Image: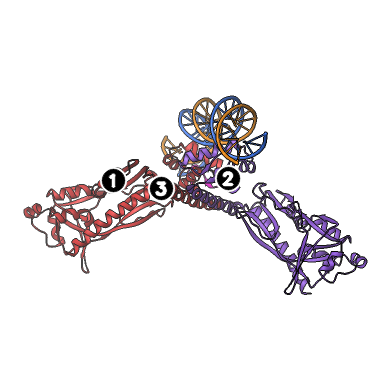
Chain colours: A red, B purple, C orange, D blue
Amino acid sequence: MKLREMELLVRIAETGSMTLAARQLHLTPAAVSAAVRRIEDDLGLRIFERTTRTLHPTEEGLVVIACCEDVLDRWQRTLDEAKGPRVGLAGTVHLSAPTDTTYQVLESLVVALCTEHPALRVVLSTSDMVQHLHRDAIDLATRYGALHDSTLSARTLAVSPRVLVASPAYLDQWGIPDTPQSLLGHRCLTLHLANVPAVSWQMHRGDESHTVHIESPLCGDGFLARRWAVAGMGIAFKSLFDVIDELESGSLVRVLPDYAGDTLGIHAVFPSRRFQPTRVRTVAAAIADRCAARAARCQAWLAR
Amino acid sequence: MKLREMELLVRIAETGSMTLAARQLHLTPAAVSAAVRRIEDDLGLRIFERTTRTLHPTEEGLVVIACCEDVLDRWQRTLDEAKGPRVGLAGTVHLSAPTDTTYQVLESLVVALCTEHPALRVVLSTSDMVQHLHRDAIDLATRYGALHDSTLSARTLAVSPRVLVASPAYLDQWGIPDTPQSLLGHRCLTLHLANVPAVSWQMHRGDESHTVHIESPLCGDGFLARRWAVAGMGIAFKSLFDVIDELESGSLVRVLPDYAGDTLGIHAVFPSRRFQPTRVRTVAAAIADRCAARAARCQAWLAR
DNA sequence: GGTGCTTACGCAAGCCGTAACTATT
DNA sequence: AATAGTTACGGCTTGCGTAAGCACC
């Protein structure tokens, strides 16, 4: 038994598919199939019960796979400990984040990390959509809101309410809304996520709750909504976390400040496997640091 | 990295020698040497610092080797759990024990085990000498007294005092000694262990301590001493544990019953590696059971 | 019919044993 | 001189990719 084979078993169990596991490990499905067969023969155990279309671990398979996870985790940590202090980070980290988080948080952070660790490669996969971490072999993603995939694990990076924002120029030209309903007469900038435009904005003041159905002249991703808002194209409904820079600098101002949107959590999301190379842990820690600093600025701004 | 390679590292560390490790794993020294080199290259770490005559783990090597032990242990237990209930014991267990223990305790036990588990093979290595468990790849040995090799771990099976015994016929013919000194006029049966005859017997009564230097007409191993004693050839100084059968049956009787020899521990001794196949654990448990039963008979006999 | 697992086959790399070599005691 | 580790080389095994086959949607 090789560690590589253990990783294969874990990946198959995680993805639920030999083909996806093969892709992640840069193998062919044929190789994976053969490897599983070989492993099962060696062990004298059936690890996966499979038809051509479904695949799930057997009872014993779960025991073995859990062991493989432990072993890989132990091994990874040992290598980190044994060779960690001497060499810088090396290898590739696959990150995925929403557009705005990518450009505001990750971009400069990645530059800093790669400068500090010349052997480190970072692949940034920018998407507002919930990507399939397993399918794309993402090491670490940031996501807004709760996640529903139980095969993932998450860590909260920040918590921040949605706020309505617009540029001073826009408000000069179109006036300042004073009730949620008055938004209907404004140019509202909505997000277009997962092929479904987000068309209703929910906000509340004390016990009041308001839902406004938006007809949007411009609809894009989070990054575009912010840029458009700064450019005076309309009112955006964004996480405070994403627009704290502009609010601090005054290029955006908060609209309807008495009304707050949902408070969204920003999470770091990992494939559930416990074994993470040092490079992933380090990058995760750096992201958490940046987000914590940014969240502190949000707190300060709200309390000002 | 393969589990087999991990085992190799552990064995090298245990035995302190590539050649011995090679022998245990049925490889050539060349293969071991090449494997170590390969592993070190793969890991980018030096595991063993070595000249042609000495070999010891590096700092990082110790970390890696400890990890390998953990991994092998975890893996072994997992396999036991995953396939344990379905199949009987299989494979080979190497045992080593003193002569008398072998013939009185292990012999019938091994027969029972092999009958119960047809796929089990047992290799019994009988010796009164302290064998090199590592060198001979012994899975489990029993030994009297404390052990001095820190790379081994031990479990106490029984504790029993040495006693002086002789057959009734012998005592009829030669008389019953009434003091330790009177042993000098008797035919005493000594052991010949590790090429050095054991020539002094120590015993005590209350606070008194007596050391008697023996001139022995017959000198052999533990088994022979017992048989000679039964045959009326003289007085033996044996662990009660070894002669409980004869004392119960009356074929031997205790001499100088007020005087007790050292209380010796009987230990099961294992190579320190933590990973033990089920077969070894099962055999160890069976031996412990037998010894416990026998020890209980010793207690009962002393208290009679 | 398409997707995903499996089988067949050829090739390349890995790994072991034999044997000669080197260094240490 | 003897012992332990290393290097060199030939052969066998392992493991992968390509390509074709097969079963469940």
Q: Position of residue B68 (x, y in %)?
A: 53, 49
Q: Which residues are magenta?
A: A46-54
The answer to which of B92 and D14 lies nearer the viewer is B92
B113 and A178: which is toward the camera: B113
Q: Residue at x 43, y 38 (%)?
A: A26
Q: Residues within 10 Å of mark 2 (few under 14, many from 20)?
A: many
User: What secondary structure is found at the residue carrying circle 2?
Assistant: helix
Question: Three-letter amino acid code at disc 3?
Answer: Gly
Label 3 – label 1 distance at C-alpha: 20 Å
In the image, B241: left or right of B20? right
Q: Nearer the viewer, mark 3 or mark 1?
A: 3
Residue under numbered circle 1: A110
How many neighbours does mark 3 have within 10 angstroms: few (below 14), some (14-19), or many (20 or more)? few
Amino acid on which the number 1 mark rests in the picture: Val
For mark 3, give the secondary structure. Answer: loop
Residue annotated with mark 2: B12
Q: CA distance from mark 2 to mark 3?
A: 24 Å
Q: Which residue in the structure is indicated by mark 3?
A: A84
Which of the 4 image quarters holds residue B31?
A: top right
* Pointer 2 chain: B
Q: Disc 1 sits on a residue from what chain?
A: A
> Is residue D18 placed above or below B118 in the rendered structure?
above
